[in-house]
Amino acid sequence: MCANFKPLTRSQQQALNLPDINFEYREEVYPNYSAPLLFQSQHGLEWREVNFGLIPKWAEDKTIATRTYNARNETLLQKPSFAEAAAKCKFGVIAVDEFYESKYIDGKPQRWGVRRRDGQAFYIAALYEICRLGDEVVRSASMITMDAIDHAMMKDFHEPGPIKRSVIVIPHARLNAWLNLKQPNLHDFVLGFPIEEFECSHVPKAKIEKVSPQLNFFDSGQA
C-alpha cells in the first residue's frame, strides 16, 4: 500500500500541458497531508487541494484518513468508507513524481521509490469525496489499488506473504477516459503498469531530529 509519495513538480505539470496549480503543497505527502488532485469538471480539467486519505460524509473527524489513504478496487462498492463516492463515480488522479513502498531485506523494511524512467509525472487512480466537518468543507481522496502478486516489480514490496498490492497507474493516453468514467466498473483500468517504463531504487529517508509519527512511518516497521 502506498502511504508516501512526491506529487508532481511545477515543471512536470507544465511538460504535460496541465492547468496551473494555484495552491502550495508539500514536497512529500503522507496520510492526512494535503495533495493536488486532478479531476474533470464542467469547465474542463481542474486541480483541487485534497486531504490524502478519504473522509466519508459520515466521519466525525479526519483521523479516519490514516486508514483510508488506499482503497482496494475489488471492494470499492462494499466498503462503507468508499461506497457512496464510488457509486457516484467520483474518480480523479493524483499526479506523482515518485511513490514509496517498503521492501523487506533480511527481515527489515527499506524505503524504495518507484518512478518513470523518462522523468515524467504519472497518474495514480484516485477516489475523492467532499464532506463537511463542523464549519469546514473538506475535500479528500484515496489512491485505488490492485492485486500485484504477479507484477514483476510490485510483487517484491510489502511484508513477506501472499498479499501484494499496487497503485493503479492511469496511462497518459487514457486520462480523459478515466476522468469521464460514468459507471463504477474499473475492470478496463486495473492493469499493472509496464515495468519497461518504470524503475525503482532504495531511497533512504533523510534523518530529521524532530518528526511527526507520520514522518516516522518507514522507521517504525509498519509499512
Image (tube, helix red, strand yellow):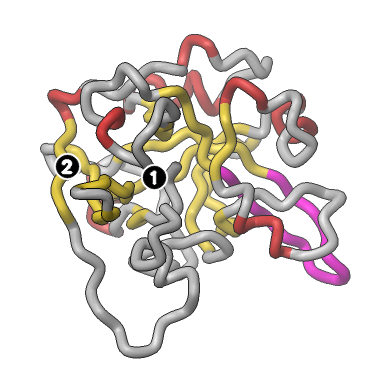
Q: Residue 135: within the magenta?
A: yes
Q: Nearer the viewer, residue 202 or 55?
A: 202
| Mark 2: few/some/many CA within 10 Å (<14, 14-19, 20+) | some
- Give me the residue at 49% from left, 74% from top: 213
Instruction: Return the mark for residue 163.
Output: none
Farthest-out residue, bottom: 209
The answer to whether residue 185 is above or below residue 33 is above
Q: Position of residue 208 (x, y in %)?
A: 30, 83
Query: In which quadrant will I find the N terminus?
Result: top left
Q: Nearer the viewer, residue 74 or 133?
A: 74
- Cα–Cα gap, marks 2 and 1: 17 Å
Q: Nearer the viewer, residue 211 or 186?
A: 211
Q: Nearer the viewer, residue 143 or 14?
A: 143
The answer to whether residue 28 is above or below residue 144 is below
Query: What is the magenta segment's predominant secondary structure?
Result: strand
The answer to whether residue 82 is above or below residue 110 is above
- Give me the residue at 72% from left, 52% from top: 55
Q: Residue 219: within the magenta?
A: no
Amino acid type, callout 2: Cys
The answer to whether residue 82 is above or below residue 195 is below
| Mark 1: few/some/many CA within 10 Å (<14, 14-19, 20+) | many
Q: Position of residue 138 (x, y in %)?
A: 72, 60
Q: Position of residue 108 (x, y in %)?
A: 27, 54
Q: Name the residue that disc number 2 marks.
A: 200
Q: Secondary structure at mark 2?
A: strand
- Give me the residue at 50% from left, 43% from top: 38
**Which region of the structure is painted magenta?**
129-142
Q: Name the residue that disc number 1 marks.
A: 95
Task: Please tell me in which quadrant of the rendered image residue 220 appears.
Answer: bottom left
